[in-house]
Image (cartoon, helix red, strand yellow):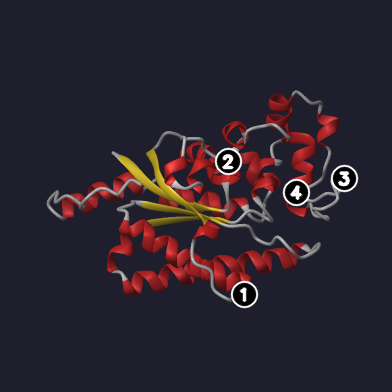
Amino acid sequence: MSCRVFVVGEGPNDIGDLARAPTYREGREGFLQPVVRNLVGGRAELDFFDGRKLTALPRDRLSTAALQGRKAAQALALATEFGADALLFSCDLDKSSGRVRPAERRRRLAELRANIQRGFDEVKEQIPEASRVMTAVAVPARMVEAWALADRSALAILTRKPHERLDYGRPEELWGDERVPGSNHPKNVWERVGGGTDFADIGAAAAPAVLARECPGSFPPFEKDVQVALEECPAREAVERVGRRDVPRGAPAKRR
């Protein structure tokens, strides 16, 4: 039995063609789908059946953390409407501010994840069916390029570059002026060392243990979410069906 996963993310680098309008999707995946498969390790069959780009959801005039909480609520409502078993929700930690100390980064991560959880809880209070949709939250520090840069061995093989070309420091601590190509902004570092590499390829090649070691602040919470949510998804669905005497869940999600 497969687990139907609804995906919401920042853009094509993290969720591939699911960030595009359904009419223009061609099946290309981003960084997160293969990473999740590696985390699950064949213990569940995953069907990433639909998704949305985060910025396509309605925007409110809120702080970044509060806004992501609102978008998380919208994402869970959509996942419930489309008959998903699980929601994979991804957003960047921070795109605009300068360097921050590790303690401040941890505080911001905790605040953002707490706001996202509050968004989920609000929807569950209003839509009882939403409680059966399991959730996994990815919040890279500070964006998915940092996670993509974490496994240097995998990146060296894919790019055919020597390891000395990949000496760019701790991925979570990379930051700089995005407008300056030589800066240590994660997007610029990625362009210099991984430009031309498909994000799905590095996602498939990266070892979860290495991601957790190199991005210790942001990746382990996501790993735990996946283990709790997606690994148990088919088993939970089977139990729910037995509890309902195998009554069908409802009409399949609409395809656009």
Q: Is 165 situated left or right of 155 in this image?
A: right
Say if 218 sits above or below 201 in the image. Answer: below
Camera-nearest label, 3 or 4 = 3
**Amino acid type, mark 3:** Gly
Circle 4 Cα neighbour tier, 10 Å, few/some/many (<14 / 14–19 / ≥20): many
> Which disc is residue 182 wearing?
3
Tag 2 and tag 1, C-beta contact below 8 Å: no
Look at the numbered disc 1 and give the secondary structure of its residue.
Answer: loop
Q: Mark 3 falls on what kind of element?
A: loop
Q: Nearer the viewer, residue 23 or 34?
A: 23
How many numbered discs? 4
Q: Which residue carries the number 2 mark?
A: 31
Query: For residue 153, which quarter of the picture?
Result: top right
* Mark 4: amino acid: Pro
Q: What is the x, y in percent for residue 21?
A: 46, 48
Looking at the image, can residue 44 be seen? no
Residue 241 as seen in the image, left or right of residue 56: left
| Label 3, label 4: how far apart the Cα atoms are | 11 Å
Given contact means CB atoms under 8 Å apart, are the residues at marks 3 and 1 in contact? no
The image's mark for residue 63 is: 1
Which label belongs to residue 54?
none
Gap between marks 3 and 2, in whole Å? 24 Å
Q: CA distance from mark 1 to mark 4?
A: 23 Å
Q: Which residue is mark 4?
A: 186
In the image, residue 219 lies at what x, y percent? Answer: 61, 51
- Numbered disc 2: secondary structure: loop
Q: Residue at x 12, y 52 (%)?
A: 245
Q: What separation in Å lies between label 2 and label 4 (alpha carbons)?
A: 15 Å
Q: Secondary structure at mark 4?
A: helix
N-terminal label among 3 and 2 = 2
Is the Cβ of the residue at disc 3 closer than 8 Å to that at disc 2?
no
